[in-house]
Image: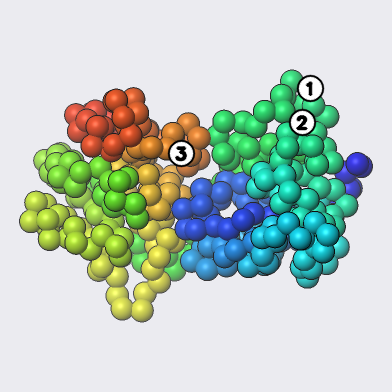
Amino acid sequence: MPRPENPRRIAVFSGAELLGDGLFKLPFIRSLRATFPNAEIIWVTAGKTAYAGVLKELAAPYLSRVIEETMIGSSLGELLRPRHVETGPVDILIDTQTVAWRSLAVKRALKPKLFIASAADYFFSGVKPPQVNPAWTRKKPKHFVDGLMRLLDLASGGKSVADPAATAIPDEYTALAARLLPEGARYVGLAPGSGDPTKRWPLERFIALAKEASAMGLRPVFFVGPGERFMLDEIKAGVPGALFPEDEAPEGAPKGPLLVAALGRRLDAAVANDSGLGHMLAISEVPLILLYGRHSPAKYAPRTPRLTTFWAQDFGGPGHELIPLTRVSAALRETLG
């Protein structure tokens, strides 16, 4: 299928994005915009997406429109009676999900001139990997974001552009972060929580890292999510000088992922679990240490330039508690120089 020249409208389909998914895919949507700077880019989802909610401001520079809850791919009957979505004529459609029948449903719903999909070993894709690069096999890349970038390469004829710039954070957040963590001190960020309790490194080890940072003359800065407030008393008792900048923001001040990312740019280093907060800090491109349990960092680690990862499987199993404090402490000291 011929590739449209100077595509005016590009649609991307995904099932849905929770907060962590949306943060994880940011390098892809940034590169999508860099590759097609003049196109209208529409993000279409079957369910809800963080790009229409908590990450709306973050996605706005890269996505022209977001259409969520279309329910595409929810029924095999769509293969005969496709759903209708008001996108307007689509020049290129990139399907990021991998279930074969759903790919057909997506294609029938949006009717693109060129369809790009990896489902069924790229069977439905209008451009196959060897047509762009003979050295490529059809097997998808190991890292999830690399798989998305492969789709962008197919859509652009191997001319995809990886956006080298840091993710844009509005000035109101950077100004607030500068007030909460002012110049004149060095800061270490610690994010001990996770929405999944099995993905939490023991809290006492984060407290031990905070004490080490204090002994080195740095200020420990804790990021605690709304589901982890039960940790506060133990943290404050163990680290009396700890800072909680999100709690110290004035009433009515802008908060959420963009504030965490802006605060991350005030830090000298940070340690976090594989969690939404970890991915928020990754946006800031702070030197970051992330701790993984069941999921492999080789596939799921965020794309951030100064990243160190520890995987519990390398220490004998999936439990976060298997990651030794001594190893993380040594990595933090090395990161801080």
According to the image, label 3 marks what residue? 301
Residue 190 point in image, percent of width and height = 26, 48
Mark nearer the N terminus (3 vs 1): 1
According to the image, label 2 marks what residue? 129
State the residue in front, 217 or 96. Answer: 96
The residue sitting at 53% across, 62% down in the picture is 50
According to the image, label 1 marks what residue? 134
* Three-letter code, disc 1: Pro
Residue 178 point in image, percent of width and height = 34, 61
State the residue in front, 34 or 337. Answer: 34
Q: Rounded to the nearest whole Å, what is the CA distance between mark 3 and mark 2?
A: 24 Å
Which image quadrant for residue 150?
A: top right
From the viewer's perspective, tell me whether residue 165 is left or right of residue 84: left
* Three-letter code, disc 3: Ala
* Three-letter code, disc 2: Pro
Q: Rounded to the nearest whole Å, what is the CA distance between mark 1 and mark 2?
A: 7 Å
Mark nearer the N terminus (3 vs 2): 2
Mark nearer the N terminus (1 vs 2): 2
Residue 195 point in image, percent of width and height = 35, 55
- Number of other residues with Cα within 10 Å of mark 3, as a class: few under 14, some 14 to 19, many 20 or more: many
Residue 329 visible in the shown view = no
- Number of other residues with Cα within 10 Å of mark 1, as a class: few under 14, some 14 to 19, many 20 or more: few
| Quadrant where the image shows the N terminus | top right
Residue 241 point in image, percent of width and height = 12, 55
The residue sitting at 61% across, 46% down in the picture is 28
